[in-house]
Image: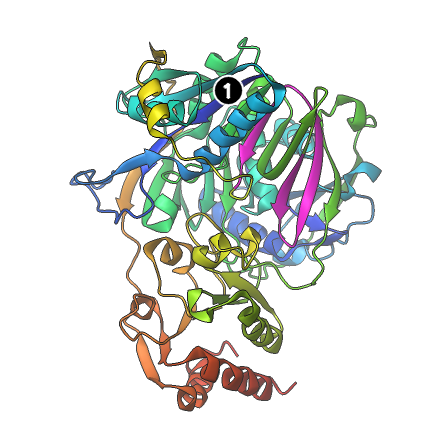
């Protein structure tokens, strides 16, 4: 089984965001960057699919600057076979522009399954994977928490409000991974050593101009300081009164 | 004059609450850039669409097919794109729900147009500016849309639905037969959970539990409080989801759901930055924690310090009393 996984380099979830001096980007000083957490589920699922089928290849593809090579190496250390960096100074704010660049690389790659994380922790658009499915004219299932693949067909589950949708589809397909799909493996030392020698192609790409520009980036307004109503169960009536009279939510 | 297309969402033939929020957001947009609000809903025959005019829709397209009882990504996207191409729209607005997060990108890809997902504010004054959270809500971006049409999904519970009565004309369209043949991915069933509680992303009140509950069985105390509120859902911190106490569908925070309920009650949750990112836009936040230095108290409007095992039963009792049920 030939599987592609599209990944992204993002700030660690522990990061405290600071706004850069241009007022349109974050200050990256001291920020630790990691493989997008949802992409870890995608990489793990790709490795499992290859292992289950007994043969094949897992190709990791990232769109981004040279720094994304390190992120690709992380996925290679988990066990992926080779990497491709679609090199650009910055990804677009317009998801369809990024989706087109990735679809261009994926087209004709004869992948059985193309995986993405359900969203990237930085822009949180939750769009590019599903857009790639549309652009390639393949079935696409987003935010899957369960997957079964056999005989050129697949069945996936996706969480919706108050339920779980079960979706059946034919391969090749594009799937985006939700937390809970699997437990991603940690790269072992041996994997990290091997990853250094795995092939990583760097291909410069020219992104189209998108239809979105950043006017401003700012921190969310701080919440007004809270009020400790008291200690223990004796404070409950004061809380009930506050909810009824001050904010009227009860 | 180009208008705004509101994509409504139904479940079991009834419009979801978010549909009224989408109409309200679309009306705000239309009042800034001109044009009327038209709406489209895709689903099985017999959808109750009576409220569309009350929330500002002037024209409604109902695209139906027997096969549309469940969300079917490809034919739903085809129906909306067909409408956009036959009309003249500056923007397509839909809810950033499980359906909208899948459908929005499909529409934008098919139209090769910009998408601004999960918007928390839209400013229309000649042009369109969209506020949307980045870094899971740790920063807010203001984006300028420079090409139209564009697709905007709006975060549920953020645009308060406002009545804006209009005379609405309804056109029912039978979707072409054979979505079966052309469709490559098909939703076959929706599995419903055993308990009929609300979803954490949709409820007006969310009561979330964390490590402070000590063990999985003690979530009963959280469930009791949820039942006392009535219109509430159970939420959970990442720690207790990773420990297997609660399903991932309950998780609030950076690798879970982002919620904006009227009232968010955090019980035994210290308030890690990843959790705060998922609930800081709640209208009112209440925290109950034994550690008065816990970061959750910095974002909470009201806090009670102490043993949650003593506080929760009392709170549940008082909520029942206050609601008179």
Tell me if residue B1 can be seen.
no
Query: In the figure, residue B227 lies in which quadrant?
Result: bottom right
Judge whether residue A242 can be spotted in this image: yes
Q: Residue at x 50, y 83 (%)?
A: B315
- Please tell me whether residue A214 belongs to the stretch shown in magenta: no
Give the residue pinned by disc 1: A4
Helix, strand or loop at disc 1?
strand
Q: Please name the predominant secondary structure of the magenta segment in the image.
A: strand
Residue situated in front as seen by the camera: A219 or A175: A175
Question: With respect to residue B156, does B70 lie above or below?
Answer: above
Q: Please, which colouring scheme is shown? A: rainbow
Examine the rendered structure and indicate whether residue B174 appears above or below residue B160.
above
Locate residue A232, reporting x and y percent: 39, 86
Q: Is residue A35 left or right of residue A240?
A: left
Q: Nearer the viewer, residue B209 or B281?
A: B209
Q: Position of residue B301 (x, y in %)?
A: 36, 73
Magenta segment boundaries in residue numbering:
A156-178
Q: Residue A162: x and y, percent?
A: 65, 55
């Amino acid at each position: 089984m030939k599987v592609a996984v599209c990944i992204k380099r993002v700030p660690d979830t522990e990061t405290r965001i600071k706004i850069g001096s241009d007022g349109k980007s974050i200050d990256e000083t001291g920020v630790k960057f990691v493989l997008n957490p949802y992409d870890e589920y995608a990489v793990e699922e790709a490795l499992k699919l290859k292992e289950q089928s007994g043969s094949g290849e897992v190709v990791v593809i990232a769109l981004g600057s040279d720094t994304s090579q390190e992120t690709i190496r992380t996925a290679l250390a988990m066990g992926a076979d080779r990497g491709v960096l679609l090199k650009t100074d910055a990804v677009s704010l317009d998801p369809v522009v990024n989706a087109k660049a990735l679809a261009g690389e994926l087209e004709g790659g004869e992948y059985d399954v193309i995986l993405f994380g359900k969203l990237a922790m930085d822009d949180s658009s939750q769009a590019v994977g599903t857009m790639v499915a549309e652009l390639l004219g393949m079935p696409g299932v987003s935010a899957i928490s369960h997957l079964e693949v056999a005989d050129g067909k697949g069945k996936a589950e996706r969480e919706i409000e108050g339920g779980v949708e079960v979706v059946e589809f034919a391969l090749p397909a594009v799937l985006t991974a939700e937390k809970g799909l699997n437990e991603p493996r940690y790269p072992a030392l041996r994997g990290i050593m091997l990853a250094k020698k795995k092939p990583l192609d760097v291909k410069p790409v020219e992104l189209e101009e998108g239809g979105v520009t950043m006017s401003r980036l700012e921190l969310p307004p701080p919440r007004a300081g809270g009020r400790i109503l008291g200690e223990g169960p004796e404070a409950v009536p004061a809380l009930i009164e506050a909810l009824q009279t001050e904010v009227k939510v009860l | 004059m180009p208008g705004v297309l509101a994509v409504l969402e139904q479940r079991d033939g009834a419009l979801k609450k978010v549909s009224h929020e989408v109409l309200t957001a679309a009306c705000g947009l239309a009042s800034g850039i001109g044009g009327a609000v038209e709406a489209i809903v895709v689903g099985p025959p017999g959808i109750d669409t009576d409220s569309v005019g009350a929330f500002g829709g002037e024209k409604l397209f109902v695209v139906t097919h027997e096969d549309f009882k469940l969300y079917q990504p490809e034919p739903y996207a085809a129906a909306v794109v067909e409408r956009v191409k036959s009309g003249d729209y500056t923007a397509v607005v839909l809810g950033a729900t499980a359906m909208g997060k899948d459908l929005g990108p499909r529409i934008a890809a098919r139209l090769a147009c910009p998408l601004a997902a999960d918007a928390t504010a839209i400013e229309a004054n000649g042009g369109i500016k969209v506020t949307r959270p980045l870094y899971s809500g740790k920063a807010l971006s203001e984006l300028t849309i420079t090409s139209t049409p564009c697709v905007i999904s709006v975060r549920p519970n953020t645009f308060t639905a406002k009545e804006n009565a209009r005379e609405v004309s309804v056109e029912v369209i039978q979707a072409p037969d054979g979505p079966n043949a052309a469709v490559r991915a098909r939703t076959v069933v929706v599995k419903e959970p055993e308990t009929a509680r609300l979803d954490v992303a949709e409820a007006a009140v969310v009561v979330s539990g964390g490590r402070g509950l000590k063990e999985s069985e003690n979530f009963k105390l959280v469930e009791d409080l949820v039942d006392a509120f009535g219109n509430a859902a159970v939420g959970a911190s990442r720690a207790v989801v990773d420990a297997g106490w609660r399903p991932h569908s309950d998780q609030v925070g950076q690798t879970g759901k982002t919620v904006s309920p009227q009232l968010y009650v955090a019980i035994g949750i210290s308030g890690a930055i990843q959790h705060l990112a998922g609930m800081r836009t709640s209208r009112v936040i209440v925290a109950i924690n034994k550690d008065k230095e816990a970061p959750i108290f910095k974002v909470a409007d009201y806090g009670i310090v102490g043993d949650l095992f003593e506080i929760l039963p009392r709170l549940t009792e008082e909520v029942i009393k206050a609601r008179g049920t």
